[in-house]
Amino acid sequence: MSSDVATLMDAGRDSAIRVEAVGKCYRMYRKPSERLLHALTGAAKPSEFWALKGVSLDIRRGETFGIVGRNGSGKSTLLQIVAGTLSQTEGQVSVAGRIAALLELGSGFNPDFTGRENVYLNATILGLSRREIDERMQSILDFAGIGDFIDQPVRSYSSGMSVRLAFAVIVHVDADVLIVDEALSVGDAFFSQKCMRFLREFQRRGTLLFVSHDAAAVTNLCDRAVWLDKGTVQAIGDAKEVVEQYMAQQHADSRNAEGRNNVKLGSPVPVASLDRSMERDIRAAEMASIGATTRYSIFQFDEAAVGSQFGTGLVSIKGVQLLAKDSGEPLQFLDGGELVRLRISCQLESDLQGLILGFYVKDRLGQRLFGDNTYFSYRHRPVEGRAGDVLHADFVFRMPIMPSGSYMVDVAVASGDQDDHTQHHWMHDALEFRTTDTTMRHGLVGLPMLGVELIWDAGQ
């Protein structure tokens, strides 16, 4: 670890954030009177609690850097010091450029001010002039999407509304360095997707410091990461490697706490019979017997409630539906593993050739899990249509089994070929479905298992 830190500290002028041997100490008194006594006479010595000790980081310009660690490890303390809202006891911190931070809920907001007044307050603190705020106010309000609540006191806001407004402000302050601390776990799925699109765009031009308990989020978003424990650096380096070390230690600590380190092997597991013709997940019945299920709720397409859209306007997407494969009936619920039909319907506003329709399914982080388009299926017979025509594209597939969460479907229609095409209508977040899963699936997407088999070789 020490060699890693030394290497990082030699980074030089490309640094966006430099943290050098930073420590934060809190003096702990048994009762308030001891604090006064110590200040007056030097008696009643306090005990010391070091929330951070000897932390050194060098975060490069344009890098996305993650911080992981359990509660009380010093993550939020470090972020507040970098953001300038908390002073360190020892060490040095420097930040290059304008910095904006989204820390704990409601931080930086005056609860007695209205949302609009807090926009002016926060944006001014972050370096915008009154004229700049006035010019961007409507865009901030549109991004936040809290309607008439903007002129109500912030104390009347839900946690989700507070995050919406805070995030909308930092989106519009042209920051060079952005700090986000767990706040994206609050709010609805549509707003989370909007935030993730902004963060991925910001990653192309700025430096992002990101804290989350979600290991998948850190691995997916971050280039490098640091693991803090009890205020000290345990590991620093590639995000995936650091997260794996952190998760391994978490697992070991959990097993120690439960007294489960000495695991004894039981009797051989009987071999389950394998039905080669079975189309459903062979574990479904067994999982159901112990109350473990996967349940999908599918929401209906609402053109007025979709995410951002773009394109030439020569084609308009009119509907997106998840249907039963054979009957074509709209689905409201699924168990996972069924054959389904995703239908995209669009109307041509002009005569066009070489039409391509496609989709992506995304998780809450905006990761594209799977998708397809019509190009290769119709490459030798290009699709064309006339103004006023309505075109439907059906994609038939077996629905994967997803971990619990909210998922969005992006849909699009273009013309051209796979590599060179013109987008006529791209619609973010056109369809939402949510899952509850207690079947212990692993990874981003679970596959229905058609067979699981153990084969024993006789001992010699």
Image: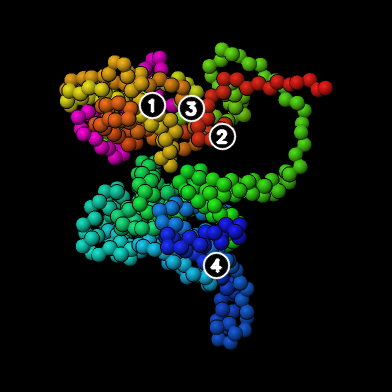
Q: Along the polypeptide, which appears first: circle 1 or circle 3?
A: 1
Query: Tag 3 or tag 4, which sits nearer the N-term?
Result: 4
- Residue at x 57%, y 66% (from the top left corner): 54
Residue 72 occupies quadrant: bottom right
Q: Which secondary structure, mark 4?
A: strand
Q: Cα distance, mark 2 to mark 3?
A: 12 Å
Examine the image and state in which quarter residue 397 appears.
Answer: top left
The residue that mark 4 highlights is 21
Question: Height in image: 98 above or below 273?
Answer: below
Q: CA distance from mark 2 to mark 1?
A: 23 Å
Q: Earlier in the sequence, mark 4 or mark 1?
A: 4
Task: Compute the Cα span from label 4 to label 1.
Answer: 50 Å
Check if residue 235 falls in the magenta segment: no
- Labels 4 and 2: the sequence-earlier one: 4
Instruction: Determine whether label 2 and label 3 are within 8 Å by CB.
Output: no
Residue 321 visible in the picture: no
Say which residue label 3 marks: 400
Q: Quadrant of the N terminus?
A: bottom right
Label 4 to label 2: alpha-carbon separation: 39 Å
Which image quadrant for residue 457? top right
Q: Residue placed at 59% from the left, 24% from the top?
A: 283
SS for tag 3?
A: loop
Distance (Cα) linking label 1 and label 3: 14 Å
Which region of the structure is painted magenta? Answer: 305-333
Q: Which mark is residue 372?
A: 1
Q: Label 2 belongs to which residue?
A: 442
- Amino acid type at image mark 2: His
